[in-house]
Amino acid sequence: MPARTVLQPSDITRALTRISHEILESNRGGSDLVILGIPTRGVVLAERVGAILESIEPGSGTVGTLDITMYRDDLGRNLTRTPRPTRIPPGGIDGKTVVLVDDVLFSGRTIRAALDAMVDLGRPRAVRLAVLVDRGHRELPIRADFVGKNLPSSLAERINVRLDEIDGVEEVTIEP
Ligand code: 5GP
Ligand code: MG
């Protein structure tokens, strides 16, 4: 069976716009927000959310990146992993509401590693999670606060997230 398209470009844009509004609503405005993207595609999504936040409320779209490579609990299994840079905005994360952004939420282990990585960078007031796709199959007590699309999937299925900036094409597909 071929891959099935679950989100088209306009769906992705709408989801990110809604998530941005939800972030502002739950934070009661844009003050002290830091949006941190998890490489690779989480960074692109975080930048887009940051730009939307800026357009709604100037000054609210502070964006950085959080590499979690060295905090994975399965690090020993893959020696080829090389860390990518973590880029924390000048104001840091102390006392801020940090919104982690990733493309797909699956077992939750990446986010666990992100929480671990953040301990070394400061002490946020609160940490929230935004993902474009929640495909289920959590192995840890982790959930997303902001979800583009809930996509119940079988373990054998693969979700492909393709974004213009990286892939030159914009779509989310599910493949058996
Ligand atoms: P987790 O750590 O929650 O098991 O997996 C989440 C991380 O792995 C995310 O950074 C995401 O990019 C990647 N990932 C896990 N499952 C999928 C999937 O089905 N499709 C895509 N595109 N990425 C996935
Ligand atoms: Mg990823």
Image: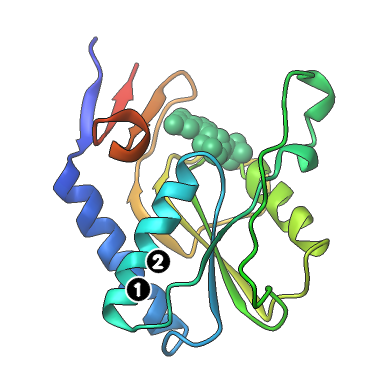
Q: Is residue 71 visible?
A: yes
- The image shows residue 152 at horizontal and vertical percentages of 38, 38
Residue 131 vs 138, above or below: the answer is below
Quadrant including the C terminus: top left
Label 1 – label 2 distance at C-alpha? 5 Å
Residue at figure coordinates x 24%, y 31% from the top left = 169
Q: Is residue 170 left or right of residue 80?
A: left
The answer to which quarter of the image holds residue 135 is top left
| Image x and y of residue 141, in percent | 66, 54
Name the residue carrying label 1.
Answer: 53
Is the residue under label 2 in contact with that under label 1 (CB below 8 Å)? yes
- Residue furthest to the front: 90
Indicate whether 63 appears above or below 134: below
Q: Relative to 39, does residue 99 appear above or below in the rendering?
A: below
Specify the label residue 50 is tagged with: 2
Amino acid type, mark 2: Gly
